[in-house]
Image: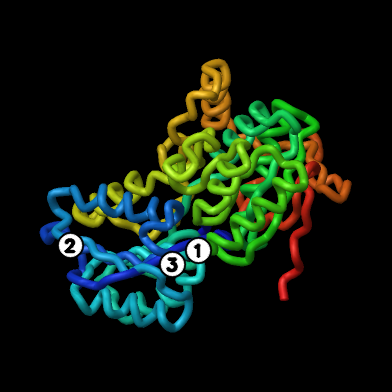
Amino acid sequence: MKKLFWIFVTIAAVMLIAGCGGGATKSENLKAGYVYVGPVEDAGWTTAHDEGRKTMEELDFVDESTFVETVPEGAEATRVITELVESGCNMIFTTSFGYMDPTIEVAAKYPDVKFHHCSGYKTAENSTNYFGRMYQTKYMAGVVAGTMSKSGMLGYVAPFPIPEIVRHVNAFTLGAQSVNPDATVMVIWTNSWFDPVHEKEAANTMIAAGCDLITQGTDSAGPQEAAEAAGIYSIGNDSDMSFMAPTAQLTSAIWNWGVYYTDIATKIKEGTWVNDPIWWGLDTGITSLSTFNEVVPQELIDNLEVVKAGIIESDQIFAGPLYSNEGELKVEEGAELNDGEKLSIQWFVKGVKGKIPEAK
């Protein structure tokens, strides 16, 4: 996320309405409303947010939380957000990049309600944005992939060509290359966050091309199912998808949104809430790798702890020299991308087999 420079981001949301309203003060209890871009049972992005919602709901001072799922971005989102506030919610969470402007629009009409938009960059007096440095966990997932793949040919099912996804593909690739310098990552775009059929087709195309490990930035478990059926390895996204691919999935790069939702609800209750944007890293636990498949060797698991500690101590994932997949030097030796550059990145690193479509 970014305050004035936060960027494009992702995601999901929405279903049934009930309870929440008015401004949150130190003495009153809270009611939360969530807007989801996908179905609650997508096994990915929205599932992760809903698990976080349930964790927050366990707080004694949170009387109720409700959600609306599969809400289209745009005018429909504005209507849903408004209805949640009118039904009594005094804190709102909108969980897809395309909800940014509707969130700001509704926030202007309800100054006593606290609004929180996931993955965007706009703020207001009573509205902020939040995200996590998932690229750090994607790097670790790349280490797993680079170690476990026999061919070094990895496949990445990607949703939209926005900086968030480009950043994640690059981090995954660099992680794989840290253990196998010859590793390559094939990218196929689905132009959708949640499209199980198309996602599975993209995965199968890459499997047919020789990829022996599939991962994704999309929300459904379609790519995991394709890997399971093909008898190859996979790495899940957003939530633990092992129940859909018990043999294939080695681990999953997951969100632990309860960390954020409980923290922000506590701040609202205590009267210490501020609208500063949040972009938390591995050290907070907001992202992590899920439980490992039994085929993952302990030596690799131990090495991942070392990698994680190194990232937390000094995030050098995008340190130079880095070349684009077109051979252009993008980051010189001794330099590294700053947060603004990470949040706006629109080039693939060397080893990525794919192109970033030009914006139409």
Q: Circle 1 is placed at which residue position?
A: 120
For the C terminus, which image quadrant?
A: bottom right
Q: Which mark is nearer the camera, 1 or 2? A: 1
Who's the residue at 57% across and 62% down the image?
197
Determine whether the residue tagged by mark 2 lies in a helix, strand or loop. Answer: loop
In the drawing, what numbered circle is on residue 37? 3
- Whole-number angstrom distance, CA of label 1 to CA of label 2: 26 Å
Label 3 packing within 10 angstroms: few (<14), some (14-19), many (20+): many
Give percent across and percent down for residue 310.
57, 26
The disc placed on residue 319 is: none
Residue 62 found in image quarter? bottom left
The residues tagged by marks 3 and 1 sit, at their Cα atoms, a distance apart of 14 Å
- 60 with respect to 201 (left or right): left
Q: Given contact means CB atoms under 8 Å apart, are the residues at marks 1 and 2 in contact?
A: no
Q: From this viewpoint, is residue 316 visible?
A: no
Viewer-nearest of discs 3 and 2: 3
Residue beneath the point at 50% across and 55% down: 220
Residue type at tag 1: Gly
- For residue 25, which numbered disc appears in the image? 2
Q: Where in the figure is residue 18, as x and y percent of width and height?
A: 20, 71
| Whole-percent x, y for residue 67 in the image | 29, 66
